[in-house]
Amino acid sequence: MRQVTLATAGFERYAKTTRRATFLAEMDSVVPWRKLFQLIEPVYPKAGNGRPPVGLERMLRIHFLQHWFNLSDPAVEDALYDSLSMRRFVGIDLGHEAAPDETTMCRFRHLLERHGLAQQIFDAVKVHLEAAGVLLRHGTIVDATIIAAPSSTKNEKGKRDPEMHQTKKGNQWYFGMKAHIGVDAESGLVHTVIGTPANVADITKADELLHGDETIAFGDAGYIGVDKRPGREHSAEWHVAMKAGQRRALDDSALGRVLESLERLEAQVRARVEHPFRVVKRQFGYMKVRYRGLAKNTAQLHTLFALSNLWMARRRLLATG
């Protein structure tokens, strides 16, 4: 084992376990590293002529840091020099070696994109959660959220991203893409992710968000009429929220009170679909797309929701661990 240098040990007299260090320690324990290495290793560059590649484990850990802390390639390189907890998580000792540069990180991401490995990572995490008894398949909640994209044309081509589109929600216009997700109704974990331009209606992707084994599905008022659409592949029983105007029109009769109670109960179930969005947007800081094109950004969504699943299930995984 390599001896720790003063670059890592330091001379500090006082120390505290920070929230970042606690977060990284928990994620280090729940990520199925070995399974993910086995996915990537067959296509990862091998040592031979020229510059030897950076270790796969190190690169995957840096890749996940970028998603957890919403860091670009240059930003994560700077963060590794600035944060001791991040260096410990990755396994870098600045007394012996430098951190990988931003070009190396960019090439690693392109490698994952080229071989469709973000989707495979997402699927591997699902299998891991199912094996742990955390992800069930009895019901699904579907929803979508808008991810903003830069609307500026101040770039080399003088144009906005042609694969992004604008849409109106309420009285506000948005430009970007949509993340459509199917969530397990019991655990609140994501089992399906689809990326589309922002102008694609939620209802058009509803059937694709079902895995086929569920008997019941839930959606908000944007999915009204989903059970009557032609070409449905799955036979799940849909429970879709009333339109706001219809719900306000309910009277105080016995039937009105029953319908209101049912709406409240179903709303409590549907609320679980908001938790993955909160983790990805608020905790991981993913509020705006980072790349041009749907393919790259959808790949990032798969990685983000795989990591959000592990974060949301971490206590049960650590307890069974």
Image (cartoon, rainbow, N blue to C red):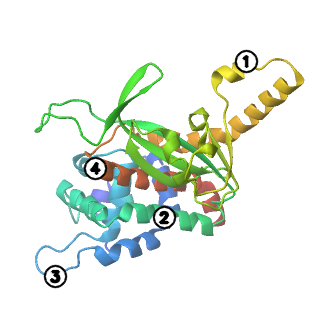
Vertical placement of residue 224 versus 187, above or below:
above
Residue pointed to by mark 4: 76
- Residue type pointed to by label 2: Asp
- Residue type pointed to by label 1: Ala
Q: Secondary structure at mark 1?
A: loop
Vertical placement of residue 173 versus 319, above or below:
above
Residue pointed to by mark 1: 249
4 and 3 marks in contact (CB < 8 Å) = no
> Tag 1 or tag 2, which sits nearer the N-term?
2
Counting from the top left corner in percent of width and height, residue 268 is at: 70, 37
Residue ranking furthest to the bottom:
48
Residue pointed to by mark 2: 123
> Tag 3 or tag 2, which sits nearer the N-term?
3
Query: Going by the image, does 304 lie left or right of 126?
Result: left
Q: Secondary structure at mark 3?
A: loop
Q: Residues within 10 Å of mark 2 (few under 14, many from 20)?
A: some
> Tag 1 or tag 3, which sits nearer the N-term?
3
